[in-house]
Each structure stands twice: as structure tokens, then as C-alpha cells.
Image (cartoon, rainbow, N blue to C red):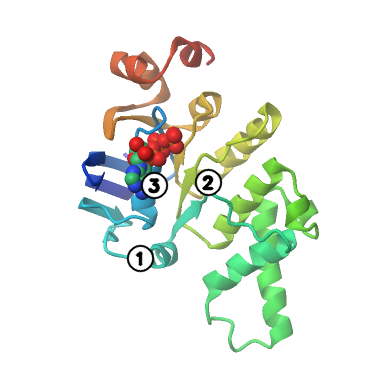
């Protein structure tokens, strides 16, 4: 079995009397895409928020690369290597694509370029940004003002921003949201090529993308995981089918 990168044990979160995630055990392994699916309101975003540090769990433990990160802040987790592509956009619309990504590279670099002259520092950050844009196939749009990008390109830019932070795992919260079929297929292919370098935990409603990309799928229903397995195993699991996977989803594959 490949190395576990991220491990959740017994994660629980309640908002008042509403228990939103309860006793969640889940792991993410090197080189894989682990998809988390479930009906609206199942607790998927709340779980991702607990992993990225937006929300503090009431109980349980989050371990990343063998280190307990449960008590770390959002930015400390990002520095530790947990990258996140936001469902809510993190793009600065008035800046160019390159500037948006260079800013993320600058945040990652912190003060490590302080000995470089400003021009050299800028060149270094732009190189890093171009590298991230190249990885996700957006380099030819580098000089475009971000607000003029298509919706699909904005989602790609968010991914480039996450990658410029040099993460060692990616948390992807509905990367295909609002995309057309063609854009979604292109992003699926890009992510498939990236998962060897960036193990990814993926929340996604687009079942075609999920079943193409995921090595394992976990089904979350009412805050609890009811099934985990390969896409084929989950597709055949009666509990998963009853809970979430309508026949449309299953036969679409
Ligand atoms: N800050 C909050 N305060 C109170 N209730 C919340 C809060 N955030 C989420 N909830 C509730 O927790 C439940 C789970 O929400 P969550 O957004 O995690 O589900 P989800 O599986 O991501 O849904 P979707 O697929 O629609 O995005 C919902 O009932 C939601 O109303």
C-alpha cells in the first residue's frame, strides 16, 4: 500500500445541536485522487474546512505527513504543504493572471528572497508563476487581466495559485463547479496528470469527472462515511447506491 499523506481520525464537528461530521476516518495516499461524494448538505465542505483549518474540529485528529496539524492555523497548514483550491474565488480581478500567481509564489517564498535585488526577486517570482501556469496549461494567458478570463479559465487560475504555493497535497472543493462539459473534461485531464505530483482530496458533484479521476471514492451521508472503495466497488455498493448514486450516475460510466 502506498504511503499515507493525510490521515483523519474521529473528526467531529457540530454547529449547535446539528452534528455535521461525526467520527470521520479517512486517508489520502501518495499519488492518488480520493474523491468525497455525497448529497447536498452531507458535510463535505465542512470536512474540507476542518482539514484546511478554516474550522476547528470539536474532536478528532488530522495528521499530515506524519505530523499532527489539528491545532495549526490555516496559514500554518498551508506552509506545512496543504494546498487548497477554493470554492469561493481567491482571484484578484484587476491583476493579470501572472501577477495573481506571482503573488501566491511570493507568499510562499516569504522572506527567502530578501537578499535578491528587487528586479531579480521579481524575475524569480515571475519564473515560479510561469512554471505553475505552464503546469496547468494557462501560460499563454499570463498577461491577460484576470477579470476577463472565462469561468473555466478562472478555475484553472485558482489551481495555478494553489500550485504556486508548492503544496504536497491538494484539497479541491468542487473544481468543476459552473463549468461546461468541454471545460470540465479538460480540467479532468489536467488533474489526472497532476495527481502523481499532488495527491488530491476531491469534492465534486460531476460524477463523470469523479469516476474518471478517483482511485478511491468515499461516500458521505449525513456527516458519516457509509462506503469507501475503488470507483467500481462504490458503484456496486448497495448502501452507496441507495444513499447517493442514482442509476443515472452509475450507468453514465
Ligand atoms: N457555519 C455554519 N453554521 C451552521 N450550520 C452550518 C454551517 N456550515 C454548514 N452548516 C450546515 O452543515 C450542513 C453541512 O453543510 P456542508 O456545506 O458541509 O455540506 P456539503 O456536503 O458541502 O453540501 P453541498 O454539496 O451542498 O456543498 C448543512 O446542513 C449546513 O446548513
Q: Quadrant of ligand 1?
A: top left
Q: Using residue 192 as the reference point, say whether residue 234 is left or right of it.
A: left
The reply to whether residue 218 is in sight is yes
Q: Is mark 3 within 8 Å of ligand 1?
A: yes
Q: Which residue is mark 2?
A: 87
Residue 47 at x, y percent in the picture: 34, 44
* Residue at (68, 55) in percent of width and height: 133
- Of the numbered discs 1 and 3, the one sitting upstream in the chain is 3
Residue drawn at x 66%, y 72% as measured from the top left = 125
Is disc 2 in contact with disc 1, using a CB cutoff of under 8 Å? no
What is the C-alpha distance between the residues marked 2 and 1?
A: 19 Å
Q: Is mark 2 within 8 Å of ligand 1?
A: yes
Residue 244 badge: none
Q: Residues within 10 Å of mark 3 (few under 14, many from 20)?
A: many
SS for tag 2?
A: loop
On screen, residue 36 versus residue 156, left or right, reads left
Q: Tell me if 164 is positioned left or right of 225 in this view.
A: right
Residue at image mark 3: 48
- Residue bearing mark 1: 73
| Residue 43 shows in the view | no
In this view, the residue in front, 227 or 192, is: 227
Quadrant of residue 226 in the image?
A: top left
> What residue appears at the point 55 percent right and 56 percent down from the top-left corner?
162
Q: Earlier in the sequence, mark 3 or mark 2?
A: 3
Task: Please determine whether, in this image, residue 242 is positioned above or below residue 129.
Answer: above
| In the image, farthest residue toward the front | 16
CA separation, marks 3 and 2? Answer: 11 Å
Amino acid at each position: 500500500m502506498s504511503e499515507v499523506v493525510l490521515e483523519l481520525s474521529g473528526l467531529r464537528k457540530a454547529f449547535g445541536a446539528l452534528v455535521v461530521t461525526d467520527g470521520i476516518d479517512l486517508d489520502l495516499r501518495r499519488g492518488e485522487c480520493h474523491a468525497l461524494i455525497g448529497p447536498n448538505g452531507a458535510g463535505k465542505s465542512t470536512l474540507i474546512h476542518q482539514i484546511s483549518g478554516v474550522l476547528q474540529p470539536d474532536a478528532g485528529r488530522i495528521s499530515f505527513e506524519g505530523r499532527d496539524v489539528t491545532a495549526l492555523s490555516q496559514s500554518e497548514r498551508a506552509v506545512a504543504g496543504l494546498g487548497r483550491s477554493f470554492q469561493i474565488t481567491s482571484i484578484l480581478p484587476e491583476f493579470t493572471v501572472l501577477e495573481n500567481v506571482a503573488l501566491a509564489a511570493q507568499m510562499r517564498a516569504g522572506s527567502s528572497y530578501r537578499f535578491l535585488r528587487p528586479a531579480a526577486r521579481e524575475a524569480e517570482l515571475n519564473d515560479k508563476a510561469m512554471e505553475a501556469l505552464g503546469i496547468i496549461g494557462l501560460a499563454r494567458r499570463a498577461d491577460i487581466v484576470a477579470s476577463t478570463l472565462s469561468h473555466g479559465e478562472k478555475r484553472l487560475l485558482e489551481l495555478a495559485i494553489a500550485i504556486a504555493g508548492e503544496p504536497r497535497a491538494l484539497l479541491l472543493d468542487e473544481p468543476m463547479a459552473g463549468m461546461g462539459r468541454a471545460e470540465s473534461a479538460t480540467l479532468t485531464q489536467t488533474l489526472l496528470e497532476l495527481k502523481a505530483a499532488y495527491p488530491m482530496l476531491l469534492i465534486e458533484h460531476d460524477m463523470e469527472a469523479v469516476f474518471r479521476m478517483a482511485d478511491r471514492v468515499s461516500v458521505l451521508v449525513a456527516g458519516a462515511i457509509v462506503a469507501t472503495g475503488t470507483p467500481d466497488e462504490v458503484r456496486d455498493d448497495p448502501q452507496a447506491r441507495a444513499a447517493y448514486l442514482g442509476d443515472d450516475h452509475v450507468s453514465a460510466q
